[in-house]
Image (tube, coloured by chain):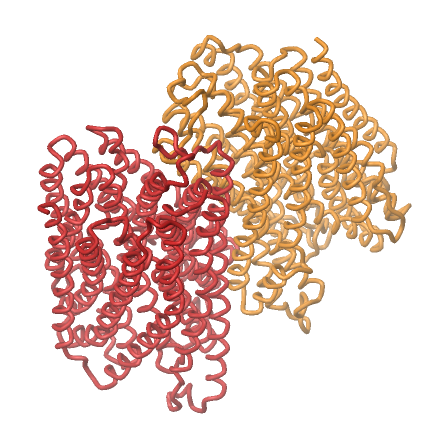
Chain colours: A orange, B red
Amino acid sequence: MQDITLAYYGAAAGLIALLFALATLASILKESMGTPRMKEISEAVQEGAMAYLNRQYKTLIPFTIVIAILLVVVLPMLDPRVEGVPLCVSFLVGAICSAIAGYIGMNSTTKSNARTAEAARSHGLGKALNVSFRAGAVMGLSVAGLGLLGVSALFIIYGDAVVINSFAFGASAIAFFARVGGGIYTKAADVGADLVGKVEAGIPEDDPRNPATIADNVGDNVGDTAGMGADLFESYAATTIAAMIIGNSIFGMEGALFPLVVGAIGIIASIIGTFFVRTSEGGNPQAALNVGLWATNIMTAIGVYFLSVSTFGSKEGFGIFLAVAAGLIVNVAIGALTEYYTANTKTPCRRIAEASKTGPATNVIQGLAVGMESVFLPMLFFAAAIWFAFWAASFVNPEHAIYGIAMAAMGMLSTAGIVVAMDSFGPVADNAGGIAEMAELPPEVRKKTDKLDAVGNTTAAIAKGFAIGSAALTALALFQAFADEVVRNPKLQHLLVDGQLVMNLNNPKVLIGLLIGAAVPFVVGASTMRAVGEAAFSMINEVRRQFREIPGIMEGKGKPDYARCVSIATGAAISKMIFPGLVAVGMPILVGFGLGALSLAGYLTGLTATGVLMALFLANAGGAWDNAKKWIEEGNLGGKKIDGEPNPIHQAAVIGDTVGDPCKDTSGPAMNPLIKVAGTVSLIIGSVLLR
Amino acid sequence: MQDITLAYYGAAAGLIALLFALATLASILKESMGTPRMKEISEAVQEGAMAYLNRQYKTLIPFTIVIAILLVVVLPMLDPRVEGVPLCVSFLVGAICSAIAGYIGMNSTTKSNARTAEAARSHGLGKALNVSFRAGAVMGLSVAGLGLLGVSALFIIYGDAVVINSFAFGASAIAFFARVGGGIYTKAADVGADLVGKVEAGIPEDDPRNPATIADNVGDNVGDTAGMGADLFESYAATTIAAMIIGNSIFGMEGALFPLVVGAIGIIASIIGTFFVRTSEGGNPQAALNVGLWATNIMTAIGVYFLSVSTFGSKEGFGIFLAVAAGLIVNVAIGALTEYYTANTKTPCRRIAEASKTGPATNVIQGLAVGMESVFLPMLFFAAAIWFAFWAASFVNPEHAIYGIAMAAMGMLSTAGIVVAMDSFGPVADNAGGIAEMAELPPEVRKKTDKLDAVGNTTAAIAKGFAIGSAALTALALFQAFADEVVRNPKLQHLLVDGQLVMNLNNPKVLIGLLIGAAVPFVVGASTMRAVGEAAFSMINEVRRQFREIPGIMEGKGKPDYARCVSIATGAAISKMIFPGLVAVGMPILVGFGLGALSLAGYLTGLTATGVLMALFLANAGGAWDNAKKWIEEGNLGGKKIDGEPNPIHQAAVIGDTVGDPCKDTSGPAMNPLIKVAGTVSLIIGSVLLR
């Protein structure tokens, strides 16, 4: 029983992170919300965000119940070895933890927006960064804390990583809907608010006369905060459990517990890292955030080195430490590449801006080209990291190689706490700027929040790279764990050669699965992209209607019906997340039971490859389009207007940006949970597949 | 020696097709070219096309020589078993045959454009179809004839399919450049002519005052005819040889010769099929073409059935016949799906048109969504065909299964003669319309050529589906042949388990190869797309310059400098085909020698999966955008103009169409030779890889 003690460390670290998050939230709530108008706006955003979350989770209840019943009734029927109750309990705990993380984080960010604006107004930039980053940290540490606590606690109860793998499935099922629904919501509101408000009516962004402005601010929270949080919660849970399963089958209990302690180290490092994020008036908030991130990375690396060497001995331990380090490095590399392809100081983005000179068509063509070319180097990095992790983990025994990839993923995700904090701080700053505008605060307040918002865009790009990278590594870890499960499946012993599962590319079953899997990201991409188009269309019509029908609305006398726009975005997001969700969860089940385990292995591989490619393509194209537009708006190539007339170059860039919106914030991000949900579903059914 | 006789059948059928093509060409040349003006224009197009072909092939000579030297010197150094001379000779014959097919076909189509216009003027629709389709048939039968003749003759000389596999490599190296160069040429000229001529100067399409109009008509030939011809020549050669290699290793000489005779049946059926293409004034040209295609398919199926049963016995022979039939059916299915996703009578295209109401951004988003969703059903069909072909070919012995996929590919390609004929007829009709316009023939002539041109758009879509489908099946056949070669490689015996090559997805080498391969189509897509943008940019500037500097050009008095536009398009296409060409040929060599045979296997799989997906995505999105614009131009949603003012809905659709142009005619088609060139390169190096 000495062994299991380490799981208590994991649980304790998770609990500490959670308590730290709640204490931080309490301290934020003590800050002033500013003027009554600011309070009013903030509460409207909060209300809208909570209403969305409530409806989203309520919609998912029947789905969750159906799955829970399948787990507790049908799986044990397929195979009497399966313990249905732990599977079902773990699944529900995973789903509930994901929801709780969403609620805590959303509470924190929506309650901090006015407080950030007020901090910028009465205290200055340093305090504004402090409030908004702490709000992000609440989200980040809730995600990591609940993830680690949940896995550790279930492991303490059931003592077997395989039994609790449905915790990850619960997390991933919720994450897919949160990501897709949030993505549809945020872009429908954004496009609707922009097209009618900015373009047609000519009023500024976040103008209180725009009926969609509250929905737009809600969207920042449900998409960028709740969606991203759920996404990384899922990666965290899935990676930890996959690493535990693989670790257990290679090293026994020691190998199963090791990932939990790596998680504990990362989470404590993240908590300490948040204290490094400090800046003064006139300081550089980006630099402050980078210090926090690097401090966390370095502390984690040092901690893991000692842990690893003491657990596995100097040679093997050093190898496993290298694998973990590879994960940390890929994280940094993908972030840097994402920045290169999307930053408006770099060639790719400038090319898009230049192409706007010959109109929107050449802008779009150039943007597609940038997106496509941006996939290659990240894929090369993944390939290198995979190779390196396998190599490092096989210093002592070549059969330990697959533990390497799982630990690289674990290394990357161990710092999720601070990465999510950095990401979630962005929407808070963005919202704060919106509130400053709507509450008509002095322009210098807006300038400060804009400075934070600009940094938020960069951290969001880094977090996006992190989410894609971690999804890819998580998918690979899940794949290995799945193969492990198939090996244990008594009905599938005929697929083994020398006790190993052979998934030969030459086998038509593998090949067909691979081709089908490779096509699925395109289907999900198409349906989510179309969902945004349709939802935005309803939003556009509603905003136009209000401008037309509400008397005095343009003079600021008639009050726009914000709630109606919020409710339209909510309804559209909820109804349109169903189809891609069913594809994501249903396809692996169909392929697995219909075509068999080898086809499912092919499916996972094909899906992961094109899923990651599409995620990078869509996210980077969208980011580059966005920044090309912003670069022109900064006054380059003629700026927004030439001699009072709209500059056609800017107009072309706006069209590219609008095309990029659903790419980067809906369809692209949907790829991460898509590949992970396939992995967690496969892991659940791997041991009961019939052929 | 009885066996080898069948190879003479193949050679004879190839020769017959070639002679039939030349006789047809001679008979076309006897037709009248019409007025001196028509003759003049036609000669300008011809001259431009030939100048392009000459420069393209001249540019490729050093490249070809380097490869020839590598084959004859370096490969035998790596492995003394390799016979350098046959490899080198076969490679050169393949490259030269591809070039000859290009020259014959181009000669035929560029010499028939004025003759088709004249036929429409003096005789009517039936005769115009007759001339233009015969011109296409010259291309189609040259492609198939030279392919079959080349493979058969080399096999008669060397007696070993493995030795002559570089015939396919020669064909594919040329094909990649022809496809990419032709694609860049055609779109640079098209976009340049349209943007400045139609949009800025407001003159109609094909107006003689437009300096880019000859280049535009040349582009139709070098892109749609020469590019497509080279593409399918490559598929034909590669599939035949891959099927022979696999057949030989399973059935010995009988299995090696069978594909040649299937080719002979298909080619004779194609010749007969051309006689079914007849229509009268007021008749339906599409129906006439369909009759020809179906007649060919049915004759081929019947012939192959009897051949197969008599060669392999009733049970096995029936199975192999079914595999061939699966290829024929996939051909039809992919064509139908392509039509569904792109035809302007169907929902996807209408959705794009409707989305144009809210501007270019929503049009583009909807187009991307249509392109993405269009990949799923074709992939499902491929998967089903693969499964079916494997199943059918394993009736007697499961180890014969892989012959099925090769024969499905062979079945599909056996009818290449008539498919290329149908495809090549389109540019002839298109050019004829251009000549009717430029030579100011009466409007009813243009109406007739437009009717043919519209049919040409449909047959082009069908051929595009055929090219993608055949590329996919060819790639799979090449993959199997590659695996076969690796098994024979003495240095790689450690990769075998029970004499079989195991390319396990669990193996990190396979996985990293797969990830890298999956990313390459994105890189080639980006570089070709950007090439079109840059080439079009030079073209736009040149046309603007001529409009500005040549006095009296707009009044029809000053003569535009057509040759300069032709030369700009030529130069841009040639210089910009180099980078993607090096990627296509170089990457498999780098992966193979750098990472080893297992990574190369992964590379081929990843490349094929995303290559086919990107080909479908880009081609169908582009086609749907194009047809959505055409549908609006037919007067729907307000048509081109509303009350004399440009209709913004139409303008939005024009932007979508322009985005789609490089997608469907450059980047998309580049995917086919990309995946095949990787296959042929791998097949060459498979037996000499060092690890």
Q: Is residue B289 above or below residue A390?
A: below
Q: Nearer the viewer, residue B609 or A38?
A: B609
Q: Position of B92 compared to A397: left or right?
A: left
- Above or below — where is A75 with respect to A617? above
- Number of numbered markers: 0
| Residue A241 shows in this picture | yes
Pinpoint residue A179: horizontal percent, then vertical percent.
59, 36
Q: Position of residue B236 (x, y in %)?
A: 25, 53
Q: Is residue B350 visible?
A: no
Q: Is residue A586 left or right of residue A254?
A: left
Q: Residue at x 57, y 30 (%)?
A: A401
Q: Is residue A487 above or below residue B110?
A: above
Judge by depth and name the residue closer to the eye, B591 or A303: B591
Q: Position of residue A68 (x, y in %)?
A: 53, 16
User: B305 or A456, which is in the foreground?
Assistant: B305
Task: State the image coordinates of residue A524 (x, y, percent, origin top left).
Answer: 48, 39
Residue at the spot x=65%, y=69% of the render? A637
Q: Residue drawn 33% across and 37% down?
A: B383
User: Quarter of the image holding residue B448?
Assistant: bottom left
Corner quadrant of residue A111: top right
On screen, residue A613 above or below B84: above
- Left or right: A250 with respect to B562? right
